[in-house]
Image (cartoon, grey):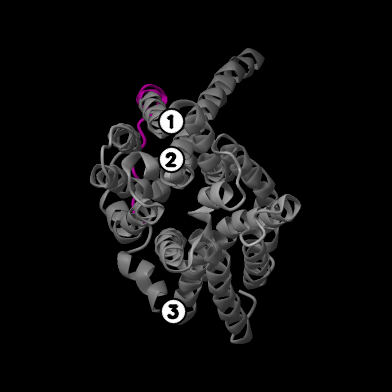
Amino acid sequence: MPPVAVAHVPHANASQSRTGVQILIMAIAAFIIVTTEFLIVGLLPSLARDLNISITLAGQVVTLFAFTVMLFGPVLTARLAHVERKKLFSIILLVFAAANVLAAVATNIWVLALARFIPALALPVFWGTASETAGQLAGPGMAGKAVARVYLGISAALVFGVPLGTVAADTVGWRGSFWILAGISLLIALLMHLLMPTLPSSPTKHPGEKQTQILRNPRFIAHVLLSVLAFTAMFSAYTYLADVLQRLAEIPESQVGWWLMAFGAVGMIGNYLGGNMVDRTPLGAMVLFLLVLGAGMLVAIPFAATTWVLVLALAAWGIAYTALFPVCQVRVMQAGAKAQALAATMNISAANAGIGFGAILGGLGISQFGLQSLGIIATLIAACGVIMALLMMRNGSSR
């Protein structure tokens, strides 16, 4: 008997190692897919100059991507849920590779818009199925850790995707950044095809009617709308942060990417704080971080020329910005606990609605009142979110 037991140890270790590699591939895929969404924020100034368009018009490709995810995400995720996961993810990565190539060769805003529209259709499908797939790969008892590793790739993209793209653009140009993303997408698609096992989709646990019952709950809808407000506040200013740093703070273009990198690095503190607070008091966490977000944005933009004030304000802004991602996701999933998968998808759609609205409102503010108006506009939206969260707390629990 002892020899048999020993013989299984290398097999078990090999299996765990293989699973670890597969989870790593999933995490890198998540990083590439989400980076593709947010990379363009750091490229807007150089992209607008090269295509001879205004920064406001360039910002609307952010809106296009976000609204596409919002409108088509839940439907496409449901329609493609039956597709075998290895095949599905490989195709998604190939779509992202092709779309990034198209963006890299875009000669006008219309080609660029098409290059943004195509991957926006595929992104929510990956978001909606990645967690389940990670759990299948890891097996019973290990699903939580596996999902956390995949979402680490998503968090890294949210925090570092924009600055990494901006830094790369300083070296290889904005087109070069898209070429690099295309190459990595193609490589991960190949690794996915070669190393991932065949994973059948899971059958739906609850009929659609039971899942959609949460949509009849006014409090759940209020939580979704609060996410829309929060992300609108965040992205009405963040979409144009690279332009703020260049034009108002007079930071050289070659250094903007490093400033954005620092913004993201400090923001990781917010990821930790938000994750710890949201379980105890979801709405309380919303109020706190929306207040910090508003204060940071309100101070950073008008005082951009004063370096030490800008640094402190950006630190507060970055911490709150990053904290609100997990706070919103967990808060909405708790509110829709009877159908968490649908609740998660609804929050993704709400977030992208806010991203789109934010880019529009920020762009309108720039065209009507100038770049300096962004801090006031974004803070007023954040204040609306604070009021809504306080009203929800008054009419119910802290959840």
Amino acid type shown at disc 2: Ser
User: In the image as oriented, which residue stretches furthest toward the top?
Assistant: 3
Q: Position of residue 297 (x, y in %)?
A: 62, 62
Task: Say which residue appears at 32% left-offset and 52% top-offset.
Answer: 77
Which of the 4 image quadrants contains residue 5?
top right
Q: Is the magenta region chiefly helix, strand or loop?
A: loop
Q: Position of residue 79 (x, y in %)?
A: 25, 53
Q: Which residue lies under the disc numbered 1?
A: 173
Amino acid type shown at disc 1: Gly
Q: Which mark is residue 46?
A: 2
Q: Which mark is residue 217?
A: 3
Mark 2 or 3: in front is 2
Highlighted range, magenta = 190-204
CA distance separating discs 3 and 1: 48 Å
Q: Under tag 1, what secondary structure?
A: helix
Q: Position of residue 9 (x, y in %)?
A: 61, 19
Q: Nearer the viewer, residue 57 or 239?
A: 57
